Image (spheres, coloured by chain):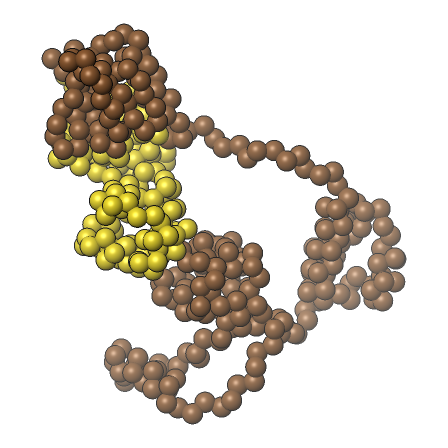
Chain colours: A brown, B yellow
Amino acid sequence: MENLWVIRRRKRMTVSDLAARSGVSADLIRAYERGQQPIPTEHLERFAKALYVDPWDINPLSDAPPPLIEKPVSASGTNQRIAQAASVTSRPQPQQPPQPLTVKPTTSKPARLSQIEHLRGLLQHLGRKEEELVAELKKPLEKLSQREASALLARLQNEIKGRGPQKPQSKRRRPYLPESVDEFEMRYLMARQQSGEPIVFHLFDGKEVCGRVIGFGPYAITVGLSDGTEMTLNKLAIAYYQTLEGRS
Amino acid sequence: MSSGDYLRYLRALKGGPDLITVGQASGVAPRVLREIEQRYRPIGDHEILTKLAHYYGVPPEELIWRHEWSRKSLSNALEAAQQQNYPLRVNLRTGESFQGKVIWWDLGAILLELEDGRQLVVQRHMVETWEPRANDLGVQA
C-alpha cells in the first residue's frame, strides 16, 4: 500500500492529470495527498482506475509528501537531488503533529451571491420559506460562509432528489458502432454458405485451406473440404480469406 | 495488432495462463490486464507495459509501439477511409500488405476491395499497422 502522491509521481502524472482522468477536483486530490482527509472508497476506486492499480494499493490516508526544497543557486541537477535527499533523510526533522482527519478550517469567505440566489431558488422549489431556514441557521443567508452555503446547497439538493420521482432503471444505451457488432462478417459468410462458393482461407502460418462454408460462429468457421472432410478454423488463426473465383 | 491483441497472443504462446496468474507473476492488477486485453482504447502506461514485457520475455518496445496502434485508432482509420472513399493500406502480421477500398468493417473483420477488383476479408487481429491513419486525413472519426 502506497501513498497516492507516490503512485501518482511514479506514473509521471501531475495533480491536474489525475484530476482530469479521475474526475476528482485537483484541490481535493491535494487535500488527500497531504493527508488532510481520508480518501473515500468511491474516490479510491476512481484513482485506482486512473492510475492502473488496485484500490487497495492506495493508502486511504496519505502521509504528507516531503516538503519541496528551495533550489540551490549553484547546484547542478544531480547535486540538487542529492542535496534534497540529504535534507529529507539526514536532517533532524521536528516532530510533526498528527494530521487531522478533516479539512482544515480555513478563513471563511462570505457566501457568493450566486450561492445565496441558488439557495433561495431551491427553497422555492421545495416550497419552504426563507425565514424557516434562517431560524434554523440562526443567521441570515447573507451571513453564511461559502463552505456553509455549499453544504446547505448539497443538503437541499438531496432533499429535492429524495422527493422526485425515481428514475426508471433502464439499460444504458450505447451508440451503434460497427466495431461493436460482427454482423457484416456474419452476413458475408451466410451469403457464401448459401451460394456454396468455395473460399480460400489464408492462415497466420502461410498455409491455405480451400473449402465451402458449412457453419460459422463468432470465433470459428467450419469448412467442408474437397475430400469430404470438415475442418473448423479458429478465427484467430485466419489472416484473411477470399472467394476462389475472386482469387483466380 | 494492438497491444491488447498482442498481449493475448503472448499469453496464448505461454500456454494460456489466466489473468490472475499473470497478474501475480507480473505485478500488474488482473483488472488492468483484462482491460488492456479487451478495451478498444489504449490502456496502461509505460510502467505497466514494461512489467508485462518482462513477464512475457519480449522487449518493452514491442508493446510500447503497439500502444499507439490501438483497435480504436484502427476503427477511426476505417471509418475515415470509408467516409472519404480513400484507399486504406493494411500491413499484416504475416508480412503481407493490401491496399483497397473499405466496403465494410466490424468487430472482427474488414472487407477490402483491392485495385484489381478482388475482395478480401481481412481479420482485424492480423492488422499490425495501416496507412493513412485517421488523423493523417484530418478526420475526427
Q: Residue A210, position in %: x, y?
A: 16, 18
Find residue A106 and report its image quarter.
bottom right
- Residue A179 versus residue A124 in the image, above or below: above
**A180 left or right, relative to A61:** left
Residue drawn at x 24%, y 39% as measured from the top left: B1
Residue drawn at x 31%, y 18% as measured from the top left: A215
Q: Determine if residue B84 is in view.
A: no
Residue drawn at x 29%, y 83% as measured from the top left: A82
**A117 left or right, relative to B102:** right
Residue drawn at x 84%, y 46% as measured from the top left: A127
Q: Determine if residue A141 is in view.
A: yes
Q: Nearer the viewer, residue B114 or A242?
A: A242
Q: Residue A123, position in %: x, y?
A: 80, 50
**A37 left or right, relative to A184:** right
- Quarter in which the C terminus of chain A is drawn: top left
Q: Nearer the viewer, residue A37 or A186?
A: A186
Find residue A204 and report its image quarter.
top left
Please state the total of marks drawn on the protein image: 0
Q: Residue A44, position in %: x, y?
A: 51, 59
Find residue A222 and report its image quarter.
top left
**A16 left or right, relative to B22:** right
- Residue B8 versus residue A191 in the image, above or below: below
- Quarter in which the N terminus of chain A is drawn: bottom left
Q: Nearer the viewer, residue B99 or A146?
A: B99
Q: Residue A115, position in %: x, y?
A: 71, 56
Q: Nearer the viewer, residue A239 or A153?
A: A239
Which residue, as the protein is rendered here, is positioned at the far top?
A195
